């Protein structure tokens, strides 16, 4: 609810560098802080009326490695703006480096005046972008927020804004795609420049149109190797409709239909242009055809097949069923899950060239519903799938894939069952591990077996049974030496086998400031703190700061992230740290298999490696920061 003394700001302002106001002059300081406006026009922030501005107060701000001033509303406790600079910055002490904006007491937007980064927070969204003279470059944006950008770009005829969320020809090349599907994607990407203006004009969207919803279903995955794809690619197939209405709500709701979205790094990109009719004239006849959906099963032939209408019919039915499942009441969920699964099976039978992909997708769908306790009957469905494939005996990899999901489904169904007691759940965990061992013996040298062995190896690491972990990792490394999973297993073997030996990391690894890491023989106990944005917990960093302050420990941070932006985001959240961090960039599409994760054999984060003063391995896998403190105390007592 809006406070009576707030008015809303919707301004587009070029952001420069400002000085933090001097403490003297309360009215002047409040006025100068309130002059700070968000750089982006779609952010609603709270600004007091002139009368209430005189009642605002400011105070010193020093938190999380930043210091400056925070401006509070007339009630003295509701924040309006924070202007700050990073502690330790070598620039002028009174320079503003970052401005934080609030709405109803919640931070909703952040402008970094040094690197041009802007972040949406709270209920304003999750986007991260960087400003330049050419507009915004997205660092992270969800599919829902991408669809909202599509709406605003079309409503205002802003080609640059649309292209910022559209898949480019260069990105298509970077994916490694070849053949007909690459040709079709390239054609779609090139159509944006030539067709955007006429399409936007034909829609006749009011400039003040408001994005309402993105009705896409769950994303899918195009596996590595299909059509030359270099890595697994997350895709929203035939993404769905985007709903909107005018700002005053006077017009009927309207929709456009997006064909496909793909995830490049942390950015969801649209393929080509959407489909839609002029605003206010929805006939319900408009649909978009997926580029990926009909092409995933084959390596050649047209990207949009001759059976396009059949594909569209099946995908529309599947999307409708998934949408109904999302809206289903608790007593309807099981029935809707039956309907979705049956559709997967029907499509698999009607489209034989896509059969394997749909069976995999159905198994992943069942596992997802079993995990959250929505569909315990999914275990029987997985069992039935496995029996069919086993009887056919024609696809060993797919059979193993389904069998592993069946084993996992049985275990997670017990975990999700509120009627099962803790002791029985522990017993189920033991049974699960035994079943994984038997499975790996039954389906040796399959990708699914490697997945099972990696799960078993990590479990052994957690209970500090390193010899057992090495055995599992060694099998994977031997069977898949050229695959990321095998490389990661090999890294784990090297780490776990180094106890009592000198331990080193690749010579080309560098700290984030560009300096080489050098020798790990630092003259004191050294902790390699391996962390990742995909497993971020601020308490871990807070505890590690205390450990680094002990004086008898040298800490080196190692980011397991693929993208510099992800690592930098965590570093900025944490603020100043009493240790240097290593970052090695990798393939942004393969999130958990960064060069650092592969070399060190890291499946989980955080994980700590402890070396002695001479750089020799003491502890290869401390699994929690709290446990690390206890271990370090023991090392200190033993000296």
Image (spheres, rainbow, N blue to C red):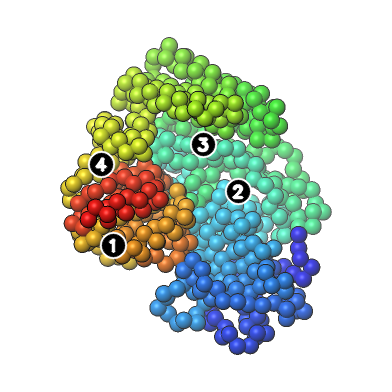
| Viewer-closest of 412 and 206 | 412
The answer to whether one can see residue 314 in this image is no
Q: Earlier in the sequence, mark 2 or mark 3?
A: 2
Cα separation between marks 2 and 4: 43 Å
Q: Residue at x 58, y 24 (%)?
A: 376
Q: Residues within 10 Å of mark 3 (few under 14, many from 20)?
A: some
Asked whether disc 3 touches disc 1, contact meaning CB atoms under 8 Å apart, the reply is: no
- Point out the tag, 2 or 4, that comes first from the N-terminus: 2
Q: In the figure, residue 222 lies in which quadrant?
A: top left
Residue that badge 3 annotates: 220
Q: In this view of the protein, can residue 414 be seen by the observer?
A: yes
Residue that label 1 marks: 552
Secondary structure under the numbered disc 2 in the rendered image: helix
Label 3 vs 1, first from the N-terminus: 3
Label 3, secondary structure: give it.
Answer: strand
Q: Quadrant of the N terminus?
A: bottom right
Tag of residue 144: 2
Q: Is residue 316 above or below residue 198?
A: above
Q: Residue at x 60, y 73 (%)?
A: 70
Decide if residue 193 is on the left or right side of residue 558. right
Q: Position of residue 616 (x, y in %)?
A: 20, 51
Instruction: Tell me the CA gap for discs 3 and 1.
Output: 49 Å
Residue 170 position within the rendered picture, expressed as x and y whole percent measured from the top left: 42, 52
* SS under mark 1: loop
Label 1, label 2: how far apart the Cα atoms are = 48 Å
- The residue at which mark 4 appears reads as 496
């Amino acid at each position: 609810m809006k406070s009576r003394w707030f008015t809303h700001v919707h301004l587009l302002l070029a952001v420069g560098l400002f000085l933090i106001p001097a403490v003297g002059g309360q009215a002047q300081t409040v006025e100068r802080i309130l002059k700070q406006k968000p750089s982006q026009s779609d952010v609603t922030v709270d600004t007091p009326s002139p009368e209430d501005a005189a009642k605002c107060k400011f105070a010193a701000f020093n938190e999380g490695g930043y210091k400056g001033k925070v401006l509070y509303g007339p009630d003295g406790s509701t924040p309006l703006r924070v202007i700050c600079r990073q502690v330790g910055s070598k620039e002028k002490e009174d320079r503003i480096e970052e401005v934080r904006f609030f709405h109803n007491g919640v931070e909703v937007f952040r402008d970094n005046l040094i690197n041009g980064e802007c972040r949406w927070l709270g209920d304003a969204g999750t986007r991260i972008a960087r400003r330049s003279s050419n507009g915004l470059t997205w660092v992270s944006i969800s599919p829902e927020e991408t669809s909202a950008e599509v709406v605003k770009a079309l409503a205002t005829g802003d080609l640059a804004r649309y292209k910022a969320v559209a898949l480019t020809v260069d990105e298509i090349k970077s994916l490694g795609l070849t053949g007909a599907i690459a040709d079709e994607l390239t054609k779609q990407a090139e159509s944006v420049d030539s067709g955007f203006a006429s399409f936007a004009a034909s829609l006749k969207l009011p400039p003040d149109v408001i994005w309402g919803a993105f009705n896409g279903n769950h994303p899918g995955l195009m596996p590595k190797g299909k059509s030359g794809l270099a890595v697994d690619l997350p895709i929203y197939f035939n993404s769905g409709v985007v709903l909107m209405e005018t700002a005053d709500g006077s017009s009927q709701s309207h929709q456009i239909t997006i064909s496909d979205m793909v995830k490049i790094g942390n950015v969801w990109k649209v393929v080509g242009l959407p489909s839609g009719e002029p605003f206010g004239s929805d006939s319900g006849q408009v649909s978009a055809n997926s580029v990926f959906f009909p092409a995933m099963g084959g390596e050649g032939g047209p990207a949009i097949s001759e059976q396009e209408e059949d594909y569209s019919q099946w995908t529309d039915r599947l999307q409708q069923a998934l949408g109904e499942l999302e809206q289903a009441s608790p007593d309807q969920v099981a029935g809707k899950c039956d309907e979705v699964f049956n559709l997967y099976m029907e499509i698999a039978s009607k489209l034989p060239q896509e059969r394997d992909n749909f069976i995999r997708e159905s198994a992943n769908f069942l596992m997802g519903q079993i995990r959250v306790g929505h569909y315990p009957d999914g275990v029987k469905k997985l069992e039935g799938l496995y029996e069919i494939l086993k009887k056919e005996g024609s696809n060993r990899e797919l059979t193993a894939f389904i069998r592993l999901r069946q084993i996992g489904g049985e275990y997670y169904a017990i975990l999700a069952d509120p009627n099962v007691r803790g002791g029985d759940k522990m017993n189920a965990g033991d049974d699960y591990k035994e079943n994984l061992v038997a499975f790996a013996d039954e389906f040796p040298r399959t990708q699914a077996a490697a997945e099972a062995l990696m799960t078993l190896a990590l479990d052994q690491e957690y209970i500090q049974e390193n010899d057992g972990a090495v055995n599992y990792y060694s099998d994977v490394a031997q069977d898949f030496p050229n695959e990321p999973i095998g490389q990661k297993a090999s890294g784990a073997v090297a780490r776990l086998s180094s106890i009592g030996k000198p331990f080193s990391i690749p010579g080309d690894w560098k700290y984030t400031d560009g300096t080489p890491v050098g020798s790990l023989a630092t003259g004191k106990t050294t902790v390699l703190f391996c962390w990742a944005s995909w497993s971020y917990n601020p308490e871990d960093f807070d505890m590690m700061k205390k450990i680094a302050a002990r004086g008898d420990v040298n800490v080196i941070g190692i980011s397991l992230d693929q993208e510099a932006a992800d690592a930098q985001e965590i570093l900025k959240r944490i603020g100043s740290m009493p240790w240097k961090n290593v970052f090695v960039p990798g393939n942004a599409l393969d999130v958990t298999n960064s060069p650092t994760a592969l070399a060190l054999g890291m499946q989980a984060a955080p994980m700590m490696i402890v070396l002695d003063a001479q750089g020799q391995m003491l502890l290869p896998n401390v699994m929690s920061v709290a446990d690390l403190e206890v271990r370090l105390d023991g090392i200190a007592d033993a000296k």
